[in-house]
Amino acid sequence: MLANMAMITIHKAKTNLSRLIEQACRGEEVIIARGSEPVVRLVPVTRKHGKRQPGALRGKLEILPSFFEPLPDDELEHWE
């Protein structure tokens, strides 16, 4: 039923949200409309870089020596 629909109303989307999410995850376009006016497109969340890998930022960040210096007393008060 939903697979052939180009657009679905908000009311029907609320009723069929699980199926619509499955469709979007399969790459199908899911448009949700208010009345006959399209308002949103449902798309899956994808990770930009895939799985996290240890050491991926090696050489891209720099820790300055000042990082290891003690905090000033007035700053330290806020942490205690």
Image: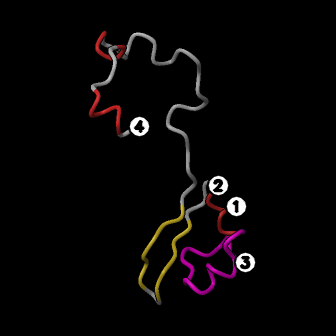
Q: Tell me whether circle 1 and circle 2 mark residues in contact (CB < 8 Å).
A: yes
Identify residue type, mark 3. Answer: Met
Q: Is residue 9 magenta?
A: yes
Q: CA distance from mark 1 to mark 2?
A: 5 Å
Q: Please name the residue that numbered disc 2 is placed on.
A: 25
Instruction: Specify the segment rendered in magenta.
Output: 1-18
Question: Of callouts 4 and 1, which one flags the residue occurring earlier in the amino acid sequence?
Answer: 1
Please give the label number shown on residue 65: none
> Is the stretch drawn in magenta largely helix, strand or loop?
helix
- Nearer the camera: disc 3 or disc 2: 2
Q: Residue sitting at 45 percent across and 87 percent down?
A: 36
Local SS, label 4: loop
Q: CA distance from mark 4 to mark 1?
A: 46 Å
Identify residue type, mark 4. Answer: Trp
Q: Please name the residue that numbered disc 3 is placed on.
A: 1
Q: Tell me whether circle 4 and circle 1 mark residues in contact (CB < 8 Å).
A: no
Identify residue type, mark 2. Answer: Cys
Identify residue type, mark 1. Answer: Glu
Residue 32 on image: x %, y % = 52, 76
Local SS, label 1: helix
Q: Tell me whether circle 2 and circle 4 mark residues in contact (CB < 8 Å).
A: no
